[in-house]
């Protein structure tokens, strides 16, 4: 295996690692957005129930 071939393989591994890291970061951000949306929906529902309980005689 010559030097150019080794360099080509190493660059491929580095690019693959960078690509996987980018996808991992995108996955983390997506999970955080979903969690925030779920929290907002639950908070809104709890607030709605509080208003109902306050309005009840």
Image (spheres, rainbow, N blue to C red):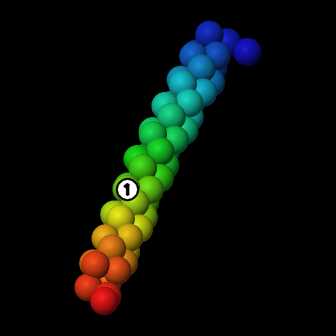
Residue 18 in view in this figure: yes
| Residue 42, image x, y percentages | 41, 68
Other-residue count near label 1 (Cα within 10 Å), few / some / many at <14 / 14–19 / ≥20: few
| Residue 26, image x, y percentages | 43, 46
Label 1: which secondary element: helix
> Which residue ends up furthest to the top in the rendered image?
3
- Position of 47 with respect to 42 (left or right) is left
| Residue 3, image x, y percentages | 62, 10
Pointer 1 residue: 36
Relative to 43, is 14 above or below? above
Residue drawn where x is 67% and y is 12% of the image: 2
Residue drawn where x is 26% and y is 85% of the image: 55
Res 14 quadrant in image: top right
Location of the N terminus by quadrant is top right
> Which residue ends up furthest to the right in the rendered image?
1
> Which residue ends up furthest to the bottom in the rendered image?
57
Residue drawn where x is 57% and y is 16% of the image: 7
Relative to 2, is 37 above or below? below
> Which residue ends up furthest to the front in the rendered image?
57
- Position of 41 with respect to 18 (left or right) is left
Q: Nearer the viewer, residue 16 or 26?
A: 26
- Position of 38 with respect to 10 (left or right) is left
Q: Nearer the viewer, residue 6 or 18?
A: 18
Q: Nearer the viewer, residue 47 or 6?
A: 47
Residue drawn where x is 51% and y is 34% of the image: 21
Residue 41 in view in this figure: no
Location of the C terminus by quadrant is bottom left
- Position of 3 with respect to 28 (left or right) is right
Q: Nearer the viewer, residue 52 or 18?
A: 52
Res 48 quadrant in image: bottom left
């Amino acid at each position: 295996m010559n030097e150019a071939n080794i360099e080509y393989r190493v660059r491929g591994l580095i690019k693959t690692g960078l690509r996987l890291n980018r996808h991992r970061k995108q996955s983390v951000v997506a999970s955080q957005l979903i969690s925030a949306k779920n929290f907002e929906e639950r908070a809104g529902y709890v607030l709605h129930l509080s208003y109902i309980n306050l309005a009840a005689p």
